[in-house]
Amino acid sequence: MESPESRKNASNDGSEGPDKASTERLDFIRTIVAEDNRTGKWDSRVHTRFPPEPNGYLHIGHAKSICLNFGIAAEFGGKCNLRFDDTNPSKEEQEYVDSIIEDVRWLGWDWKDRLYFASDYFQQMHDYAVQLIKAGKAYVCDLTAEETRQYRGTLTRPGKDSPYRNRSVEENLDLFERMRKGEFPDGSRTLRAKIDMAHANLNMRDPVMYRILHESHHRTGDAWCIYPMYDWAHGIEDSIERITHSICTLEFENHRPLYDWFLDALGAYHPQQIEFARLNLTYTVMSKRKLLRLVQDKHVSGWDDPRMPTLCGLRRRGYSPAAIRNFCKVIGVNKFNSTVDIALLEHCLREDLNRTAPRVMAVLKPLKLIIDNYPEGQIEELDAINNPEDASAGTRKVPFGRKLYIEQEDFMEEPPKKFFRLAPGREVRLRYAYFVTCTDVVKDPAGNVVEIHCTYDPATRGGDAPDGRKVKSTLHWVSAARSLPAEVRLYDGLSTKENPEDTEEGQDFTANLNPESLQVITGCRVEPALADTKPLDRFQFERLGYFCTDPDTQTEGRLIFNRTVGLRDTWAKIQQSQK
Ligand code: ATP
Ligand code: MG
């Protein structure tokens, strides 16, 4: 395995998720790879690649492709390249290259020295094009984009040959050379493959290989003014890198005949293209174009807004790489497009955080609680367990005193039947501390409860009554004197619709944006152990959910936490109800 982190995760496996049995069966792609290894088809080499176009940030859908390509390489003792498919200068930027590198690495994968750029192959692609022209298999065409479309025909109607289709090899070589030298304006000519204008597959109707584009490229600058089209470029990239299994999403199934035609026509090394269904998630927009729109139109604070399904957004939200990798393992791969319930992603997240996140106490909406029989000025350091799922995480001290904060929600002056938390006359446990009984409430002139008074039972230190008496609830709390102020940001789905594209006519996905997807709570209090927290540290705030430290904490010099996910596992619930 290439990645040390993933190796560790594969072997110590608490990380399997709910569906272990099915992940142990080989999926259809791994079955092909295993069979190829058995027959020696590729001399028992396994070499995959992850080929992002640097025109946006990676999202959770890309994670599926990353984990598939790097995962297969790792499992079969092979290699996986990180290759930028940077053939379209108008949308590509170095910023995206940098972010993609960071995100793939964060996910835990390692391409060693195999970082490649399609733009490094531009000369080879050009030379291959000349080879096809010389073989009479490509020609320069002067049709405009619109004419080319019209000549192409439709699914039910064959196309028409371009009037330029039968140019001589010499004329084609000359025109292509002049295209390359920059003699012609954008869009005036293309280089096309000479295949079959009546082919049942539209992709085979003399597809464009090169177009003229006088634009600077983020890596090659002004060296080129012709740029290769995806279908022409991609197979060559795979071929040059001697990829064995070129794994891509289903929308390229119709392009496979062309992938094969180009490589056969060149007589070049020829990988096998295999298609799988892309990931779709409920309540989630999953296309770089639409995510870019959310950023540009300022519906979110940036690509790394914690509501975004981008890897940097998920990271800032508090997702761990292990949780995402495990999710990708659990969903598996298949040939049919479907939509995965976002509750499954959150389930995988909780599974990981439950094992790894230290517990702390925080109060989001504080209500002052005064223990009248507790000595004024006294502070006790009580022992609290850092992680009940991990004994090695140890314990910490939490300061307790006469004045505390509890959650406003945990007190009701007139409790309904099923409310078991604090109420006048009632005794509850304060976690890791004592039993307290509410004796009095103080209200403001408007009648709101602003302070509650209690007595505590010193014999219940640590949270158990020696006489065996029980209480019906345990509340979290913080010391009023020692707790720290904090801001907490709660998130909900960006879309109110399970299918974000489900709109009225004339609207687009932005019509379904959830106006309440971000809720900022100020005036929160957290236990002092959080004083030194670093950006992206992950915690469980007891009873409230999983949280992580927002990077703004560092830049703004105050504590800011993102709620990663609540504690309630709706996926486990769904599964239970199906049993
Ligand atoms: P988008 O559709 O979001 O704009 P893309 O396919 O244009 O994405 P690329 O940079 O070309 O983005 O993607 C790199 C690789 O990731 C490709 O092999 C692509 O098939 C794969 N990929 C993209 N989106 C998904 C997805 N939702 N699920 C699985 N794989 C995906
Ligand atoms: Mg693409």
Image (spheres, grey):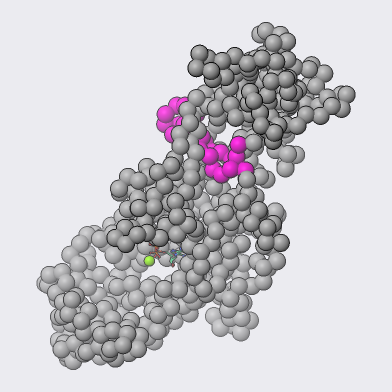
Query: Which residue is nearer to you in this view: 248 or 350?
Result: 350
462 left or right of 530 in image: right
Q: Is residue 58 magenta?
A: no
Relative to residue 161, is residue 397 depicted above or below? above
Q: Is residue 545 magenta?
A: yes
Q: Which of the 4 image quarters holds residue 144? A: bottom left
Residue 110 position within the rendered picture, expressed as x and y whole percent measured from the top left:
52, 57
Residue 567 position within the rendered picture, expressed as x and y whole percent measured from the top left:
62, 43
Relative to residue 15, is residue 406 depicted above or below? above
433 left or right of 369 in image: right
Q: Residue at x 50, y 53 (%)?
A: 105
Q: How many marks?
A: 0
Q: Quadrant of the N terminus?
A: bottom right
Query: Which residue is nearer to you in this view: 308 or 519?
Result: 519
536 left or right of 187 in image: right
Residue 70 position within the rendered picture, expressed as x and y whole percent measured from the top left:
54, 64
In the image, the segment drawn in magenta is 544-567
Query: Which residue is nearer to you in this view: 132 or 272?
Result: 272
From this viewpoint, is residue 570 visible? yes
Q: Residue at x 55, y 27 (%)?
A: 365
Q: Which quarter of the rendered image does ligand 1 occupy?
A: bottom left
Relative to residue 176, is residue 73 depicted above or below? above
105 left or right of 506 in image: right
Residue 155 position within the rendered picture, expressed as x and y whole percent measured from the top left:
32, 85
Q: Residue at x 81, y 26 (%)?
A: 464
